[in-house]
Image: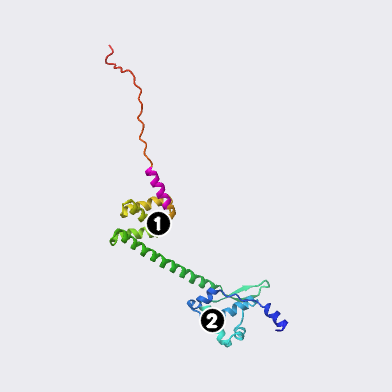
Amino acid sequence: MDQNLLLKWTTQRQLSVPTLLLKHYKELGLKENELIALLHVQSFIDEGDGFPTPELLSERMTLSMNECADMLGRLIRNGFLTLDKRWDEQGILFEFFTLDPLWIRLMKLLKGEQKEKQEQQKQSQEGLLYKRFEEEFCRPLSPIEAETLSMWIDQDQHSAELITAALREAVVSGKLNFRYIDRILFEWKRNGVHTVEQARAHGEKFRKYNQQPRQEPKPIKVDSYPSFSWLDQS
């Protein structure tokens, strides 16, 4: 390979394309030619040309100048590209492209997918929790019991693991009822118990305290004094 050609190739700028964009551009509503056009626009921006014309863009693509102009307009209307204006130091107004809307939409998509995944995981955990309660109670839960279980999760913000630990504590204590489990969760919350490990440590501490021998109170020694009755005094 010619040395000058190799030097030119190695000194070229590298365009960094996020893998997440390649994975999710279809979900964003982008077509392949639109994705390539956006990458070309970003390449022009990196080279110092913030406003590549449709003519310049068509030189790099298999599309005509009019097709590139239509595509740029469509990308702007669909919220993938923005054409901003700015005054330079000489007071001249110039226009430039920015791909910020594309990155914002990609970030929102990923956040939405993460939230949906967390919601699915939460529903799965709740389903297993209901099943665990019905197995321990050996019967389906009543509507009131099911509502109480939902309140522990949604309103009191107890995790499924902590509720399961409270259920286990009730089984060990031989007091398998929702009122007792609710009392356990209330005590844990009041004492700052948020994890299963903290609940286990709190339970062991409570049992050790109850197993300590109770000391009988010592009788109060009363000094004896000679009795005296003012009625006997003449």
Q: Quadrant of residue 41?
A: bottom right
Give the colour scheme of this rendering.
Answer: rainbow
The location of residue 231, given as percent across then percent down, is 27, 16
Marks 1 and 2: which is nearer the front? 1
Which residue is labeled 2 in the image?
34
Classify 10 Å Cα crowding around label 1: few (below 14), some (14-19), many (20 and above): many
Question: Disc 1 versus disc 2: distance between alpha carbons?
Answer: 49 Å
Magenta region, residue range: 199-211
Instruction: Say whether residue 223 is left or right of residue 94.
Output: left
Task: Tell me, yes or no, whether the highlighted magenta stretch contains residue 173.
Answer: no
Up-down: is 85 above or below 223? below
Task: Tell me, yes or no, whether the highlighted magenta stretch contains residue 210.
Answer: yes
User: Which residue: 51% across, 78% down?
Assistant: 77
Which residue is labeled 1 in the image?
162
- Provide the secondary structure element on which disc 1 rests: helix
Q: Are marks 1 and 2 in contact (CB under 8 Å)?
A: no
Work out whether residue 217 or residue 21 is closer to the camera in this orientation and state it. 217
User: Which residue: 61% across, 78% down?
Assistant: 43
Up-down: is 146 above or below 60? above
Instruction: Say whether residue 56 is left or right of residue 122.
Output: right
The location of residue 9, given as percent across then percent down, is 67, 80
User: Which residue: 56% across, 84% down?
Assistant: 69
Q: Amino acid at mark 1?
A: Leu
The location of residue 29, given as percent across then percent down, is 48, 78
Work out whether residue 222 or residue 116 is closer to the camera in this orientation and state it. 222
Q: Is the stretch drawn in magenta largely helix, strand or loop?
A: helix
Instruction: Say whether residue 78 is left or right of residue 213.
Output: right
Q: Amino acid at mark 2?
A: Glu
- Provide the secondary structure element on which disc 2 rests: helix
Up-down: is 79 above or below 201? below
Classify 10 Å Cα crowding around label 2: few (below 14), some (14-19), many (20 and above): some
User: Which residue: 51% across, 76% down?
Assistant: 23
